[in-house]
Structure formats: C-alpha cells, structure tokens
Image (cartoon, rainbow, N blue to C red):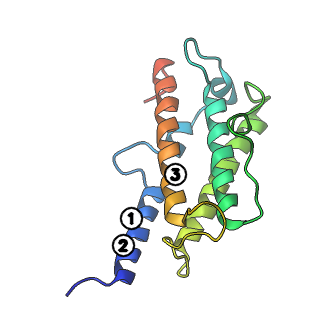
C-alpha cells in the first residue's frame, strides 16, 4: 500500500521536529552555548570577526525575524544586513547574556510548538512573502543555526572552552 500525502507530510513534519528537538550526530545550538559565562561570550577573538555573543545575538535576531514573518503578515524585517547584527560588541553583564539565551530558547520553542500543531500545513505557501512556507522557514532556521553553531564551537575549541 502506497503512503498517502497526509502520511508523507506527517513523516516530514516528524523529521523536522526531530531535528529541532534533538541534536542527533551533531552538537546543537543549545549545546554550543551551554556553560559559557557572559565574559567568555563577549571576549574579542583574534583573527575572527565576531565573538560568541555577537553570533548568538545574530542567531536570536534572525530566528525572531523568521518566527515573526511566519505568524504575522504585517511584520517587517530589519534592514539587511545591519539589522541582523547587534549594535554593540559584547553583553554588559550576565543578565543580558541570559536574556539572549532565554530569547533564543523561547522563539525556538514557539516555532517547535507551531510545527507540532495538528493543523499546521507545513507545505502551504504563506499568503504574504514571496512563496515561503513553514517548511521552507524551518529549513532556513536549521541551516542558518548550523552554520553559526560551527563558528561558535570553533571559537570555543580555540579558547579551550569545549569538551
């Protein structure tokens, strides 16, 4: 018996959820950021254009932008590229670092909850935008985060902050 389209879409959704909720063979974003102090996160890196906090803030801003684009047709994205990067070079303290981490986690959970909804048609194109779908935006979050997670882990390794 051939699988139905509904069954295939459910499998696709389940696989997306698996990538969003478990790291599999790779370290995920939360692993990469875990255990860092705000001082480490904001430390300037020799021969590297960004520090970990700048990368984390960039991830936060981009992920927020994607989530808001998906759920709010009236939302307007920041100017590219400057609007997707923090205006300063490091957090001012542990409270700001924690806020960055908490906001990343909250938007991540919001997106995962949306994917879990039974009525979420992940392949339906949004009425706004240029043809994007929830599926497309999920891939964008995963791809974007994976790129920067690699940079974060590299910085941690170079500084002896990685296991």
Q: Which of 100 and 75 is in front in this view?
A: 75
In this view, 5 is above or below 53: below
Q: Where is residue 30 in the image (x, y as percent from the top left)?
A: 54, 45
Extreme left residue here?
Answer: 1
Whether pointer 2 and pointer 1 mark residues with C-beta atoms closer than 8 Å, the reply is: yes
Q: Mark 2 points at which residue?
A: 11
Secondary structure category for the residue under label 3: helix
**Furthest-front residue in view?**
130
Task: Tell me what residue is drawn at x 55 percent, y 12 percent.
Answer: 47
The Cα atoms of the two marked residues, 3 and 1, are separated by 15 Å
Q: Which one is earlier in the sequence, the residue at label 3 or at label 1?
A: 1
Q: Mark 1 points at which residue?
A: 15
Asked if 134 appears above or below 6 in the picture, the reply is above
Residue 140 tag number: 3
- The secondary structure type at the circle numbered 1 is helix
Q: In this view, does 58 lie to the left or right of 132?
A: right
Quarter assignment of residue 100:
top right
Q: In this view, does 53 lie above or below 117?
A: above
Q: Dot 1, how many residues are within 10 Å of its Cα: few (below 14), some (14-19), or many (20+)?
A: few
Which quadrant holds the C terminus? Answer: top left
Q: Which residue is drawn at 65% across and 17% down?
A: 44
Measured as percent of width and height from the top left, residue 3 is found at 27, 82
């Amino acid at each position: 018996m051939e699988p139905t389209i509904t069954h295939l879409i459910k499998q696709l959704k389940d696989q997306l959820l698996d990538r969003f909720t478990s790291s599999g063979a790779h370290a995920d974003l939360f692993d990469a950021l875990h255990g860092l102090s705000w001082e480490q996160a904001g430390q300037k890196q020799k021969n590297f254009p960004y520090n970990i906090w700048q990368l984390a803030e960039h991830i936060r801003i981009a992920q927020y932008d994607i989530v808001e684009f998906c759920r709010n047709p009236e939302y307007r994205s920041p100017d590219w590229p400057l609007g997707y990067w923090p205006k300063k070079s490091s957090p001012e303290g542990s409270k700001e670092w924690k806020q960055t981490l908490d906001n990343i986690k909250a938007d991540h959970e919001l997106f995962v909850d949306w994917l879990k909804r039974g009525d979420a048609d992940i392949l339906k194109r949004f009425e706004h935008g240029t043809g994007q779908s929830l599926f497309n935006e999920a891939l964008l979050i995963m791809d974007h985060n994976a790129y920067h997670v690699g940079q974060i882990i590299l910085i941690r390794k170079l500084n002896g902050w990685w296991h």
